[in-house]
Image (cartoon, rainbow, N blue to C red):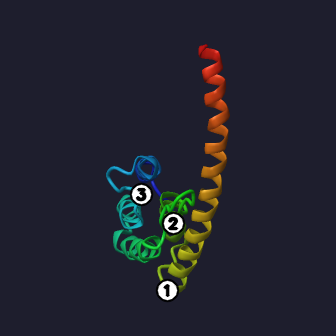
Amino acid sequence: MEFNILSILAVIVVAFLAGMEGILDQFQFHQPIIACSLVGLATGHLSECIILGGALQLIAMGWANIGAAVAPDAALASVASAIIYVKSNNFTLDGRNIAIAAAITLGTVGLALTMVVRTLSVAIVHRADAAAE
């Protein structure tokens, strides 16, 4: 299955909005049902991605930030698993299960990447403070 340039650009915009919204938490674009639906709309597989997004939303309802514990990255998990699901062109139950398994794995990897980026940003802020003085 090949995508045209407009579909690719639309998916990139959805991924950007979902990623930024995961930090800002203002309009809920990072929720799996929204992110997967928008990827499905951009790629022409809306109903399949809504079903995937609903399944991922049920899983993500159990993810919560409690104290210092940070929940997995729902935006990365949603967008990447929807892309994997659409590109596989396997819209059966097995294809959806593979996309869900990939989403859980990618959400955990996104959590690790978030921790690395936040750790590195502390050093960058300290250097910026030192340069400002």
Instruction: Residue 21: tell me if it is visible.
Output: yes
Q: Which residue lies furthest to the left in this view?
A: 27
- Where residue 36 appears, x then y in whole percent? 41, 65
Q: Nearer the viewer, mark 1 or mark 3?
A: 3
The answer to whether residue 61 is left or right of residue 104 is left
Q: Is residue 16 visible?
A: no
Mark sitting on residue 93: 1
Tag 2: amino acid: Met
Looking at the rendering, which quadrant does residue 70 occupy? bottom right
Q: Residue at x 66, y 43 (%)?
A: 119
Q: 90 and 37: which one is in front?
A: 37
| C-alpha gap between disc 1 and disc 2 | 19 Å
> In the rendered image, which residue does mark 2 sit on?
1
Asked if 110 appears above or below 130 in the picture, the reply is below
Within-10-Å neighbours for mark 2: few <14, some 14–19, many 20+? few
Front one among 26 and 6: 26
| Disc 2 element | loop
Name the spot of residue 74 as percent of width and height, x first.
Answer: 49, 62
Mark nearest the camera among 3 and 2 is: 3
> For the residue labelled by badge 3, is the local secondary structure a helix, a strand or a loop?
loop
According to the image, label 3 marks what residue? 30
Position of residue 20 relative to residue 92, above or below, is above
Answer with mark 1 or mark 3, whichever residue precedes in sequence: 3
- Are the residues flagged by discs 3 and 2 in contact, CB closer than 8 Å? no
Q: What residue type is labelled 1?
A: Leu
Q: Which of marks 1 and 2 is in front?
A: 1
Under mark 3, the amino acid is His
Q: Which of marks 1 and 2 is nearer the N terminus?
A: 2
Alpha carbon separation for disc pair 1 and 3: 24 Å
User: Is 63 situated left or right of 35 in this image?
Assistant: right
Residue in the image at 64% along x and 28% along y:
126
Sequence order check, earlier mark of 3 and 2: 2
